[in-house]
Image (spheres, grey):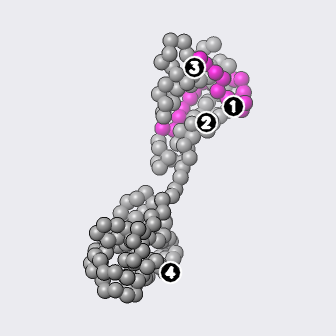
Amino acid sequence: DPIYSSLIEVKNTNRVLVGTEHGLYATSDITVANPTWTKENNNKLPNVPVFMLRQQTKGNLESYNSGMIYAGTHGRGIWASDTYYSQFTVGINEITPKDKTVVSEIKLYPNPTRDMVNLSFTIKKQENLTLSVYDLKGVLVITKNLGKLPEGEQLMQIGTEDLISGTYIVSLSSNTEIVGTNRLVVIK
């Protein structure tokens, strides 16, 4: 069969796909002397010529279709294979304070907010504290050294007018550890 297009899979350079007169074929190891080729259609792609193969090579933080393979056929349109798809995930592992004796739970209100959010917490043990606000990519967007605050209830305001709409993580940390976190939603 004639081969019209080929593709080296972005996450496994030994895996090669080829578009032929009779569909899409793949081998899991192109480096062996006699690679084994198998039909790569998951019972979806019909037995048609495949003239063009393309794979989304951007990572899942840069695109919503990372790893997807697209096959351009003759007369049957464009087909997509999610076999090598890398799902886009948004999330942050929850950080559990090791020492709950420094600060009580951080409260944010109003949440969601537009221009200003109130931050309240109770200091149970005096330590130097730093306030940090991160976007969901982990980029630090606000930082403020609070110093040693007196024990007791604390109330302060954070200006969010320079932030774009989205979800942020507000974090309080001492010199040695994170002592409290909460999520903040900004809407514009």
Local SS, label 3: strand
What secondary structure is the stretch in magenta mostly built from? loop
Q: CA distance from mark 1 to mark 4?
A: 50 Å
Local SS, label 2: loop
Q: Is residue 48 left or right of residue 63?
A: right
Q: As shown in the figure, which amino acid type bears the numbered disc 1?
A: Asn
Q: Identify the residue at image location x=67%, y=29%.
A: 41
Residue 42 is labelled as: 1
Q: Is residue 73 left or right of residue 170?
A: right
| Quadrant (top left/top right/bottom left/bottom right) for the N terminus | top right
**Which of the two residues, 85 or 107, is positioned nearer the viewer here?**
107
Which residue is label 2 attached to? 83
Q: Identify the residue at image location x=31%, y=81%.
A: 126
**Which of the two residues, 104 or 82, is positioned nearer the viewer here?**
104
Which residue is label 3 attached to? 4
Q: Report the mark closest to the observer, 3 or 2.
A: 2
In the image, residue 111 lies at what x, y percent?
A: 51, 77
Q: CA distance from mark 4 to mark 3?
A: 59 Å
Q: As shown in the figure, which amino acid type bears the numbered disc 3?
A: Tyr
In the image, residue 58 lies at what x, y percent?
A: 47, 42
Q: CA distance from mark 4 to mark 2?
A: 43 Å
